[in-house]
Amino acid sequence: TKGVSEYQAGRADAAEACFRESVRILHDAGDARWEGIARCQLAIVMQDAARWDDARAMLVEAKRCAERDGAWNVTVMVDQARAALAHALGELDEAEVLYAAVVDTHRRVRNRPFLGIYVGYRGVVARERGDLDRAASLLAEACDALESDHEFLLAGDVFDHDQLVDFISHLRSDDAAVRNRPHPFEVGRYFDV
């Protein structure tokens, strides 16, 4: 927790030192689950410092720890971090594959609060790839997930019910606006005379 506190306080060097020490201690203790989590946290610090290669290498090691441990929650945490790194680097194909794996895991274990979030990230990647139809369908799926399970957002007065209803309505309006208009390819193919 000291590494997290240092990171939240903006002291990246101190956070990195704490996470490195945690990795060493957990590795020596043979605790693959917590070693994988510590490596994932260390990779996030490296990513924030634009040390992309170091972050990627650390996530490869975190993935190995997750595979040794076999816990779905560590595996999905590592895949989330790997997807975010690929997305940040513009590696959209890899980001899509990793986000899809994360969504499948959350769907399989019925972790609905996070399902909508990662479906939304897939939609962002689809939009950046220029696949607007896919982005729109993922947006609709993210809205469905948010509508079906949003109690976690109401806890602690983060959002109130009316805000969520308005937000979902706004997203659905955007989705309808995209779906109810011809795609540029259709215009070029059928209306270009």
Image (cartoon, helix red, strand yellow):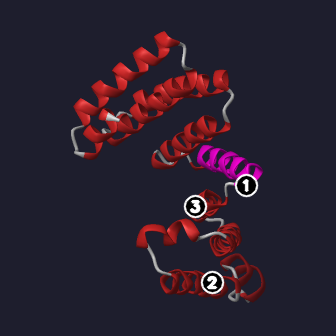
- Which callout, 3 or 2, points at the residue further toward the start of the chain? 3
User: Circle 2 is placed at which residue position?
Assistant: 172
The range drawn in magenta is 93-110
- How many marks are shown on the rendered structure? 3
Mark nearer the viewer, 3 or 1 = 1
Task: Check the picture and name the quadrant holding the N terminus.
Answer: top left
Q: Secondary structure at mark 2?
A: helix
Pointer 1 and pointer 2: residues touching (CB < 8 Å)? no
In the figure, is residue 179 to the left or right of 53? right
Crowding at mark 1 (Cα within 10 Å: few <14, some 14-19, many 20+): few
Q: Earlier in the sequence, mark 3 or mark 1?
A: 1
Q: CA distance from mark 3 to mark 2?
A: 16 Å
Quarter occupied by residue 156:
bottom left
Circle 1 SS class: loop
Measure the alpha-carbon separation of dots 3 and 1: 13 Å
Task: Please determine whether, in this image, residue 74 is positioned above or below residue 118.
Answer: above
| Residue farthest top in this picture | 28
Query: Depth-wise, is mark 1 or mark 2 nearer the camera?
Result: 1
Secondary structure state at the residue bearing disc 3: helix
Q: Position of residue 143 (x, y in %)?
A: 64, 74
Prevalent SS, magenta region: helix
Tell me residue 130's x, y (percent): 61, 65
Q: CA distance from mark 1 to mark 2?
A: 24 Å
| 143 w.r.t. 95: above or below | below
Label of residue 70 in the image = none
Q: Nearer the viewer, residue 91 or 115?
A: 115
Task: Work out which quarter of the rendered image holds the C terminus and state it.
Answer: bottom right
Give the number of the disc on residue 110: 1
Q: Residue furthest front?
A: 156
Where is residue 75, by image quadrant? top right
Tell me the residue that label 3 is attached to: 117
